[in-house]
Image: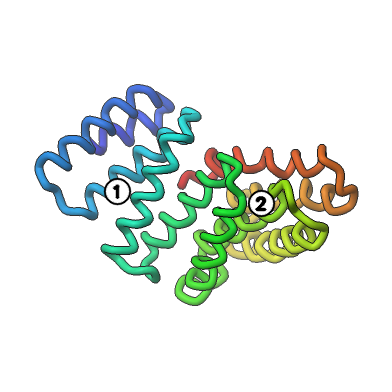
Amino acid sequence: MTELGLGLLAADHYEDALSVQEADLATLRRLGAPEHHILCTQSNLANTYAAVGRDEEALPMRREVYSGRLNLNGEEHGETLSAANNYAKSLLTLKRSEEAKALLRKTMPVARRVLREEHRITLKMRWNYALALCCDPSATLDDVSEGVSTLEDAGRIARRVLGGAHPTTEGIENALRDAGAALAAREGDCVTSVCEAVAAVNLLDGS
């Protein structure tokens, strides 16, 4: 059933995928499936919720997946770090920038130490962190400047490692253009344009 749900999702049949994934999760829980399988299914379901704009439902599921991965795999495991990034994405989408920043400040150093700077998860964490800095309504000039610097560095690494056509590279560079404009002008419309890039985080480059 998991494969069916993923196939429907890949074909953009989101509502059908939701029905299958929800049934799959209920079955796994009823049968007492291994925690790893349940967490994978929850993560897939949360991604589908996000894809159809049901962000309020995606958030608690991503929080649960992150907590589950911490308990099952520990803070240094790639699955845990991926779950942390997904959780941060949901917080950003719901404009909870302070919580996203706090989470990423805790997990980014782990990703940089364990996965290294060049890893896609590390790059995406830095991308999200920069967006959190720039999208915070109380962002200072220093915050936006830090966001721009973070995007510049992440963008250089992404282009070198992933190539210029990769969705992660494109997303970082698009966010950098908007963040640079916000830094230059420091006007509400510019900061809003940076925040619009948050939506792309859920669409570009999968989870």
Instruction: Give the amino acid at mark 2.
Output: Leu
Is residue 192 found left or right of 162 in the rendered image?
A: right
Q: Picture quarter containing residue 78? A: bottom left
Task: Give the farthest residue toward the right.
Answer: 185
Q: Is residue 196 above or below residue 64?
A: above
Tally the numbered discs: 2
Is residue 203 found left or right of 189 in the rendered image?
A: left
Given residues 72 and 151, the one toward you in this image is 72
What residue lies at 33% left-to-right and 23% top-to-bottom? 16
Q: Where is residue 66 in the image (x, y as percent from the top left)?
A: 38, 55
Q: Are marks 2 and 1 in contact (CB under 8 Å)?
A: no
Q: Give the residue pinned by disc 2.
A: 131
Query: For the residue labelled by badge 2, is the local secondary structure a helix, a strand or a loop?
Result: helix
Query: For the residue labelled by badge 1, is the local secondary structure a helix, a strand or a loop?
Result: helix
What residue lies at 57% left-to-right and 70% top-to-bottom? 117
What residue lies at 40% left-to-right and 28% top-to-bottom? 11
Task: Give the farthest residue toward the bottom.
Answer: 113
Q: Where is residue 12 in the image (x, y as percent from the top left)?
A: 43, 27
Q: Tell me the crowding category of disc 2: few under 14, some 14 to 19, or many 20 or more residues within 10 angstroms, Cα based.
A: many
What residue lies at 65% left-to-right and 63% top-to-bottom? 154
CA separation in Å, label 2 and label 1? 26 Å
Q: Give the residue pinned by disc 1.
A: 40
Q: Position of residue 21 (x, y in %)?
A: 28, 33
Instruction: Give the amino acid at mark 1.
Output: Cys
Name the front one of labels 2 and 1: 2
